[in-house]
Image (cartoon, rainbow, N blue to C red):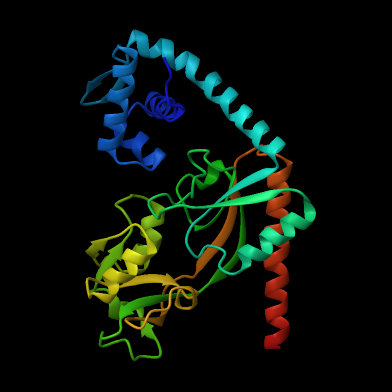
Amino acid sequence: MDVDTRLLRYFAAIAEEGNLTRAAHRLFVSQPSLTKQLKHLESQLGVRLFTRSNTGMTLTEAGHALAARVPPVLAGWDAAVSETRSTARVLRVGFLASAANDATQDIVAAFGGLRPGWRVDLRQAPWSDPTAGLASAEVPVTLLRLPFPGEESFGVRTLFSEPRCVALPSVHPLACRASVAFPELWDEPVIVAPALKGIWREHWLALSERDGREVRVGAVTEQPDEFLSAIASGHGIALVPASTSHFYARPDVVYVPVTGVSPSEVAVAWLPDAGEAVTDFVRCCVDVTRSRRTGCDRRSG
């Protein structure tokens, strides 16, 4: 009988957390989806792995037996995958839309120069996964934005920061302004990413800078195109990195600088002990972004 390793990772997370809600948050999946996958695993094995109660999830005798075996199985599989990819000279890199912007191609080129014969396989993740595949170990390194859930479990290096602006429908009364103070936006409905709790969502809603004002959700979207369409249709506004105006320009969406909110930070993050290829990629990220920043400073001076 073959079992998907993802089901084993889900089982391990539930066993370690002892709670479906916490496990779902850790895995960046919805609780109903996690429950469905657990039932699928139990069906495949023909045993109950947990007893459920108001206090959480308790391993059955069969569950304890599986929990003892799963960690080394997953560790062995991860090592095999890492060794296979290294032999194939392919580095999988996760990224979120607009994370490193136009620096990405320069980073990839620098990595190719440092490791001739290697290829970078870029994999875009939906906004429902702020770690861009890192938390599930689908990729060993990612380009993303800070802060993100579980940040302390990974290697992280900040590359640069940029101001945040507000994306508005072009017919919005504030669309013609040179800048907007954040309090002017507090009563506007907001377009949000899928309903994840924690620092990722809090940052993009700027909850700490709302003076306790409650957020009204206008729509929930997962990809850039539907996100911008929701804004253009008047369902709400959203805080976005300033560079979004360059990479996602549309005639029906206007980007206006916002005062009173913190900037957005772009970082490279990686799995612990991810290997020398990842170390080299991180070095290229740092060197390229530093070089670009120095060049901009010289031109502006």
Task: Classify residue 25 by image quadrant.
Answer: top left
Above or below: residue 252 compared with residue 40: below
Residue 206 in sight here: no
In the image, residue 168 above or below residue 70: below
Q: Is residue 205 visible?
A: yes
Residue beneath the point at 60% across and 55% down = 268
The mark tally for this picture is 0
Q: Position of residue 210 (x, y in %)?
A: 32, 69
Task: Give the camera-side residue of 148 and 38.
Answer: 38
| Quadrant housing residue 273 | top right
Q: Quadrant of the C terminus?
A: bottom right
Residue at x 57% of width, y 25% of height: 77
Residue 228 appears left or right of 136: left
Q: Quadrant of the N terminus?
A: top left
Residue 290 is situated, as x and y percent measured from the top left of the image, at 70, 68
**Residue for point 67% across, 61% down:** 107
